[in-house]
Amino acid sequence: MKIFNTLSRQTEEIKPLEARKIRMYTCGLTVYSQPQIGNWVAYIYSDILTRTLIANKFDVYRVQNITDVGHLVSDDDGGEDKMEKGARREGLTAWDVAKKYTEIADHEGYELLGLLRPNQLIPATSLIDKQIEFAQELSDKGYLYKIDDGMYFDTSKLTDYGKLARLDIAGLQAGTRVDMTGKKNVTDFAVWKFSPTSQKRDMEWDSPWGKGFPGWHLECSVIARESLGDQLDIHTGGIDHIPVHHTNEIAQTEAVTGRQFVKYWFHNNHLKVNGTKLSKSLGNSYTLQDITNRGYSLDAFKLLVLSSHYRTEGNFTWEIMQAAQNRINNWQAIADRRWQTEIVSKIQPDISTQIIAKLSDDIDTPGVLSVIDRYFNNINESNTAPSPDSLQTIHKILGINLLQADISDSQKNLLALRNKARNEKDWQTSDKLRAKLLNQGIGVHDLSIGQVWYRSA
Ligand SMILES: [Zn+2]
């Protein structure tokens, strides 16, 4: 199995640190507002990555953090803490905001989208003591210095700082126009931020350096180390995390352990809406509820996401959403042929091996969807039925469920009556029965091979 490794900029065969075992870490959501569809893209791709690893017989152990403190509005340690901002917006405490959106994200991700639950989901606030210990280690090793608003990491102490993003440090340093607010280097970042003297924060803790809260990157270094050890096989996240967040996770962890933090970095590109960025002000920051309110299924949304390769930019429009829904309805109708044995009795061969092979080649989701399209088209043209094993694999590895149960006996009876009426050219009865079936969500096609039913959307 191969994936593209951002660190090497190469597609590499996966060779874990320990045979067959994968230690995998994913940066979780910042739980301060309603997640929108763009937030789910990273988790949908890392879910497919996990399922493909499992299909390749790897023993996968996954950890994901929940960012419930310290993620500031600006990635360079500026602006307000997003949690405190959410608290002000909703008239709640930061703690209540974290609880509310942790529950919402949990429900949406694992129940609505059906993503595999990581082995551990760890909120940043649950490991504050470990984060302070880790910062103390950095301080003891001489990596930290103090300025007005916090303890900062001196990135000039690492010879390979910025290797993941291939940052041009000299260029950044020369081109900087931002107020450095006492930072020694433009790339230096906060490990511990001090509480402002003017206002009381909902979330703050005592530390050897003063009352405050951890810098955003610290939680990932610490949660990963506490749950998975000093070295990980795979770390996933969005490409926006490459230059700052992941670069700084590497800096902190490698400064403490002296060992390579992560072997394979897996980064996904973003989903745009109508070719532009999702934003509240543009009115296009759709949620999963907006999708289901318009009558689309979340399996169809997953299909829309997977129709772009994880390393290319995706696009969402309601037209593309409709096309994805049509594609899935078509698949479902053909999958249902297996119940219609009076019409189709021949089962097509299982394509599980081809599905797994495509995904094992750098998670080629557009490629795997084409394989499935070809399979179903062929079934449609040859009046045959799909193998149940193929449908199981589509469910298990893409998380798309085409395994709906057979229709009921009374519905089958209505179909038989309609068929009889048609054969007797009693069009009135036949149309009445068609309408009755449609009311129950069963559509009927009259094909050359006879009457074929499908689930109407
Ligand atoms: Zn992270």
Image (cartoon, rainbow, N blue to C red):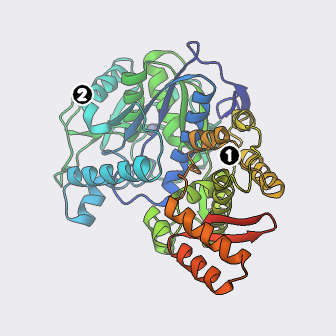
Within 10 Å of disc 1 (Cα), the crowding (few <14, some 14-19, many 20+) is some
Question: Does residue 367 appear in this view?
Answer: yes
Specify the quadrant of the image occupied by residue 388: top right
Position of residue 50 in the picture relative to residue 138 (left or right): right
Question: Does residue 316 appear in this view?
Answer: no
User: Quadrant for ligand 1?
Assistant: top left
Q: Is residue 357 placed above or below 84 in the rendered structure?
A: above
Disc 2 marks which residue?
A: 129
In the drawing, what numbered circle is on residue 370?
A: none
Ligand 1 has an atom within 8 Å of the beta carbon of the residue at disc 1: no
* Residue 30: % across, % down: 38, 49
Please name the amino acid that badge 2 sits on: Asp
- Quadrant containing the N terminus in the rendered view: top right
Residue in front for this viewpoint, 115 or 280: 115
Disc 1 marks which residue?
A: 311
Position of residue 353 in the picture relative to residue 236 (left or right): right
* Residue 158: % across, % down: 53, 24
Labels 2 and 1 touching (C-beta < 8 A):
no
Residue at the image position 48 percent from the left and 44 percent from the top: 115
* Residue 278: % across, % down: 53, 65
